[in-house]
Amino acid sequence: MGARSERILYWSAACAALALRVLAFLRYRFDSDEQQHLHVTWGWTAGLIPYRDLFDNHSPLFHLITAPLLALLGERADILLWMRAPMLVLFAFVLWGTFVLARDLYDSRVAAWSVLLLALFPPFFLKSLEYRPDNLWNALWIAVLLLLLRALGTFWIGLLLGCALAVSVKTVLLVIALVTAGALWWFFLPRNRRCDRLSGKAGLAILGFAVIPAAVAIFFLNAGAWNELLYCNFGFNAHLAQARTYLWILRATFPFTLAALVWMVWRTRGTAHPRRWFIAVTMGMFTITLAGFWPLISPRDFLPMMPPAAIFAAAALVRMRRPLLAIGAIMALFLASIYYYAGRFEKHTDWHITMMNQALRLTRPGESLMDYKGETIYRRRPFYYALEIVTRSQMAAGIIPDTIAQDVIRTRTYAAQADGPMWPPAGRAFLLANFVNLGRLRAAGQWLQPDGTFTIAIPGPYVVLDERGLAPGNLNGTPNDRARHLEAGTHRFTGAPGACVVWAPAFERGHSPFHLRDLEF
């Protein structure tokens, strides 16, 4: 196979990657993490202080810098589609940075295949599409590598790493990996192969690294949210280890994996290109540190390792005896995997857009809504914590109390997300007993007992409905002809059977438990 065959294979795969990127952008389901992140971003636009006024267990910079775009777009049901657009810019930057790195480490041929391998690698393809801080974190890491391997701007390298720390606490692991790789470089490589430009000016790097975290610290200290920031970013995540004992097993094995890495570094110290060796050591150190100490590991945590992994994979493939056959097989596998994990590119964005339409009709700005993690974006949750896996694990272990019922009553929250497995048992039981289904959402209310009695948990305005509207009959002895303020406790309706009491504004805004809106867009 010659150069022409290689060009045909390359551009065919590149066109496929572009087409699938467009399809996935419009049709790939919204991850609940995207909704959680966007809810925190909305908090900035609403004048709320993360950690103090609403929960978040991530560093603040990503949400802060994307908040102006959210404020410009306003409240809209398809907001996540719009907020995915900046991720395309970060995606393009990472691909460009991968090309430059690969060209510096190898040549243009390896660089071209590195970009395509990375673009079609299923975890990177899907995660780089989503609205999440990890994409900015990855882009900053690529910028660090570009400057580091060219020994340019020590201060700026530190500044970029500081920005990365303000985007993700996992940057601590990247810094550990870089420092370890640098130390091993210094001790193991022959003196005539050391790069003095990478070992000096540590003070400038530390100064640059401190700038952005110091600014973040000053801001949250002045806002009275410093303790909350520390808890949400460190204490909350660290508590997961108390709920998952296997994490201590991973930590116990860390010294052995570290020793294995050092042994491999020693064995390869004189056989590899020094800059490739440095990146490989950094990758190894980050991986074993992440596995040993990070409380919850997922594919997105490895995003910074994917570009250099693609470079090394491309370099190995082009040196094979029949490189195009191997590359073609890998591309086919990647494309098939993307098709599978993207749900065959069926349109799965409508579910969230439907719910958002209902949320914006059912509630008004300033009214709270009980959802899992911030899925309704523009409304505050009465319960502080996001019900993600870390929270649910700690609730199951008794570390975080389930106060959903008390918080919903205290804040007069009359709307909630539909039932599902993510609700904790006590909170779920309360919502099932005191809210009625409207489609993707629920409103405070209750189906009447056969004798016409019902209970109100959240005092407020209510109406008694049947499938035609206001149910004919008497509520607490007076005609049911309008919305009525009902106090907490037991009430009685006498009239047609099969009626339902529901929060009055829900009915006034076009919602009824007799006419669900699951399929409305």
Image (spheres, rainbow, N blue to C red):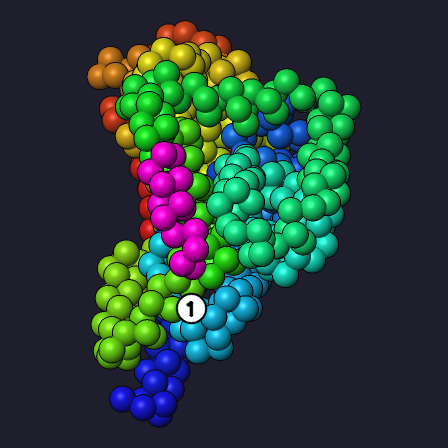
Residue 320 drawn above or below residue 185 = below
Q: Nearer the viewer, residue 39 or 356?
A: 39
**What type of secondary structure mainly makes up the magenta span?**
helix
Residue 308 drawn above or below residue 456 = below
**What is the tally of numbered marks visible in this picture?**
1
The secondary element bearing badge 1 is classed as helix
Quickly name the residue at label 1: 114
Q: Nearer the viewer, residue 102 or 439?
A: 102
User: Could you tell me residue 349's position as x and y percent?
Assistant: 39, 55
Quadrant of image for the N terminus:
bottom left
Which residue type does callout 1 highlight? Answer: Ser
The verdict on residue 265 being magenta is yes
Q: Which residues are magenta?
A: 258-272
User: Could you tell me residue 332's position as x and y percent?
Assistant: 25, 71
Q: Is residue 162 left or right of residue 474?
A: right
Q: Residue at x 71, y 50 (%)?
A: 154
Q: Residue 142 is drawn in which quadrant?
A: bottom right
